[in-house]
Image (cartoon, rainbow, N blue to C red):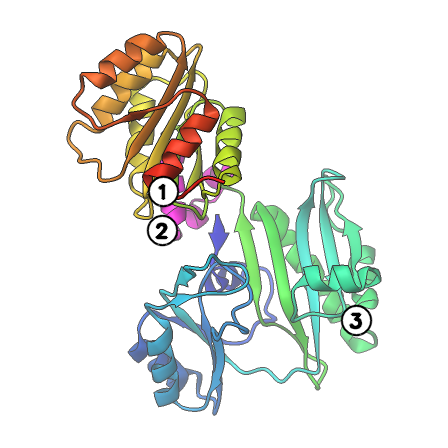
Amino acid sequence: MKLYEYQAKELLKRYDSHFPRGLVAYSPEEAGDNFRHLGNPQAVIKAQVLAGGRGKAGGIRVVNSPEEARSYAEKLIGSRLVTAQTTLEGEEVRAVLVQEVVPIHRELYVAFIVDRKSATPLLMGCPEGGVEIEEVSKRSPELIFTEPLDPLFGLHPFQARRMASSLGISGSVLRDAAGLIMNLSKAFIEEDLSLLEINPLALTPGGQLSILDVKADFDDNSSFRHPEISSIRPSPRESIEAEASSYGLNYVGLEGDIGCLVNGAGLAMATNDIIRLYGGRPANFLDVGGDATAERVAQAFRVLLEDPRLKAVLVNIFGGIVRCDTIAQAIITALKDRELKVPLVVRLEGTNSQKAREILETSGLKITFSTGMKDAAIKALDAISIIPH
């Protein structure tokens, strides 16, 4: 689960105090009140979306009065912010963070990630913060410094000091920076985060450190240990993912408009790939599992249809342990009390596939049947007027 910036900062305040004051606002009036509460001549308004690149997209601005804070928040809240990390539709802004302005001498980058190659947590740092780290790694890879975290003992103090030194920090600030990095490593491990990115970590002209922006991803598999995080209000897409998970379904929301219901992770990925190959965009990865029951498939169908972006649904099932007639009956059950407003394309092959087709043909549902992966993808795209190429 991805955390919004203000949520991540609240989480990290249990471990460290290097934060500027800030208050979240869900309305323009609340943004103006927050400006007054901070009591400073200036504040920065930051759109709360789960994507980077907000500054370039107009999602961050310095304001000089409560009226200006209210006016800018009014433009943001309820709008859709399009950044380099969102789709063309952008992400809806439901809240803004009103934060005090911090004078900046230098901007640094610090992050904790899970490194897939070494299968271990990793501390990353760069003396150039405030920009996308991918740009720096391509342009100047020598500026990216790393320190592995011991799986048993975590980050050692000497590693934190070495990273601070690599970032160009020296003198009296070095000890403070090393302590901050140690605190962040503790939060990363204890809170079961899969990503903790501080960008930028500001160094002020007076030699103070301040965490200006935070990106944090929480590992859903550890939710039983962190009920306080699990209760955080998720984004609309993550709400669907959370509901799917409660049914034992493997669901990942994507950015397209063709809903996919498939049994088996490999077949699900192949289905998404072939939709993309012919010019479409899958709306999700949804694997009901090789041993899915009729009840689970019916629940999957209901979850799938909660996505308002869908323009078509593709059911791609290879019957093995799960018989095709079981899937057919589950589809009928899921749609018994619900009107299907988008085209439904079904490919059923394997055990009892002919029986399944007969069940669906006599169900009264409007279904387009297909044979083979290519045919299924083309018919799904044709249903939403995308011409395959």
Which residue is rendered at x = 44% and y = 10% of the image?
320
Residue 237 drawn in magenta: yes
Total count of labels: 3
Report the residue marked by disc 3.
174
Q: Which residues are magenta?
A: 221-247
Mark 2 touches mark 1? (CB < 8 Å)? yes
Label 3 sits on a secondary structure element that is helix
Q: Is residue 279 left or right of residue 342?
A: right
Q: Which mark is residue 236?
A: 2
**Pointer 2 with pointer 3, Cβ within 8 A:** no
The secondary structure type at the circle numbered 2 is: helix
Q: State how far apart marks 2 and 1 are (Cα).
A: 7 Å
**Residue 346 falls in image quadrant:** top left
**Residue sitting nearer the eye, 145 or 15:** 145
- Residue drawn at the location 70% of the way across and 58% of the way down: 182
Q: Nearer the viewer, residue 378 or 21?
A: 378
Lower position in the chain sequence, tag 1 or tag 3: 3
The answer to whether 145 is drawn above or below residue 105 in the figure is above
Prevailing SS of the magenta stretch: helix
Rounded to the nearest whole Å, what is the CA distance between mark 1 and mark 3? 44 Å
Q: Earlier in the sequence, mark 2 or mark 3?
A: 3
Mark 2 → mark 3, Cα distance in angstroms:
42 Å
Residue 240's tag is 1
Give the answer, above or below, for where 21 lies relative to 253: below
**Residue 44 is covered by the magenta coloring:** no
Indicate the secondary structure of the residue bearing disc 1.
helix
Q: Amino acid at mark 1?
A: Ile
Q: Residues within 10 Å of mark 3 (few under 14, many from 20)?
A: some
Please, what is the three-letter code of the amino acid marked with disc 3? Leu
